[in-house]
């Protein structure tokens, strides 16, 4: 008999703990008086909602935070992540690109996300535009090597998928101009990019003499 009461007690305790956990999470999400309505509090609540897979609610909170701070790369990236999880890749790409345009530390990750989704969808022109957007951000932010690699990516997309030889060479030369003495590995990447461009432009297959 005591075993039955003991097992019932375990269930009751477990339910009580679950209730406490839900009370903490739900109060964090919905108690606007306790957690305020400034952009930081809104983004914190949105992050919790996103982790709980409450995607629509997370998006609404991120949008509210953007009303306080319109150029917030973190909020745009949060929306992009939510849109990726709900399968709306078009809006995931648009918000990831918005995060790049907003600038800030999330720009490289946002650009990588957008480029991955765009190439997955076969939108190589769009992926090139995103790579150039990242290159512009990187140059303005003093991130020289990120800019260099972004130009190389734009060049490779132009030559390998778009057949735009003129643009491919222009972007490769833009990367080359960013080289500094001691950039041995970066110089190798630029050289390889130009080599691949010439191979593609000449119609030779890789491995031919």
Image (cartoon, helix red, strand yellow):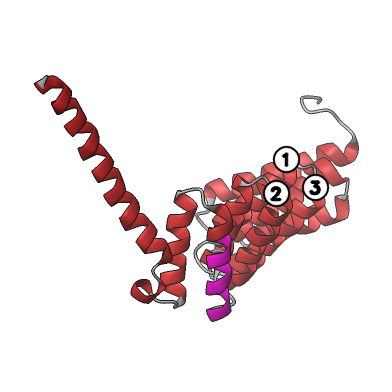
Picture residue at 73% right of the left edge, 48% below the top: 118
Q: Predominant secondary structure in magenta?
A: helix
- From the image, tell me which residue sits under label 3: 123
Q: Secondary structure at mark 3?
A: loop
Q: Quadrant of residue 177?
A: bottom right
Residue 51 falls left or right of residue 2: right
Q: Are marks 3 and 2 in contact (CB under 8 Å)?
A: no
* Number of other residues with Cα within 10 Å of mark 2, as a class: few under 14, some 14 to 19, many 20 or more: some
Tell me how far mark 1 sits from mark 2, CA to CA: 10 Å
Whether label 1 touches label 2, CB < 8 Å? yes
In this image, 154 relative to 109: left or right? right
Nearer to us in this view, 125 or 85 = 85
Whether residue 65 is in magenta: the answer is yes
Residue located at (74% from left, 52% from top): 90
Contact check, label 1 and label 3, Cβ < 8 Å: no
SS class, disc 2: helix
Residue closest to the far bottom: 68
Magenta part of the chain: 59-68
| Picture coordinates of residue 79, whole percent (x, y) | 59, 59
Q: Which mark is residue 128?
A: none
Label whose residue precedes the other's in the sequence (3 or 2): 2
Q: Which residue is mark 2?
A: 89
């Amino acid at each position: 008999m005591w075993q039955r009461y003991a097992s019932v007690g375990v269930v009751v305790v477990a339910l009580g703990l679950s209730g406490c956990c839900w009370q903490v999470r739900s109060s964090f999400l919905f108690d606007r008086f306790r957690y305020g309505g400034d952009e930081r509090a809104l983004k914190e609540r949105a992050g919790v909602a996103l982790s709980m897979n409450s995607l629509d609610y997370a998006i609404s909170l991120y949008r509210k935070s953007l009303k306080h701070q319109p150029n917030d790369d973190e909020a745009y990236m949060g929306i992009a992540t939510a849109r990726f999880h709900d399968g709306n890749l078009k809006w995931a790409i648009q918000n990831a690109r918005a995060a790049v345009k907003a600038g800030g530390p999330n720009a490289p990750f946002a650009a990588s996300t957008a480029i991955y989704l765009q190439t997955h969808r076969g939108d190589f022109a769009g992926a090139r535009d995103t790579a150039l957007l990242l290159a512009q951000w990187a140059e303005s932010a003093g991130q020289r090597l990120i800019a260099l690699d972004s130009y190389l990516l734009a060049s490779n997309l132009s030559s390998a998928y778009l057949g735009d030889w003129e643009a491919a060479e222009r972007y490769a030369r833009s990367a080359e101009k960013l080289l500094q003495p001691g950039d041995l590995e970066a110089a190798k990447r630029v050289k390889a990019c130009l080599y691949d461009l010439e191979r593609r432009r000449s119609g030779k297959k890789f491995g031919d003499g």
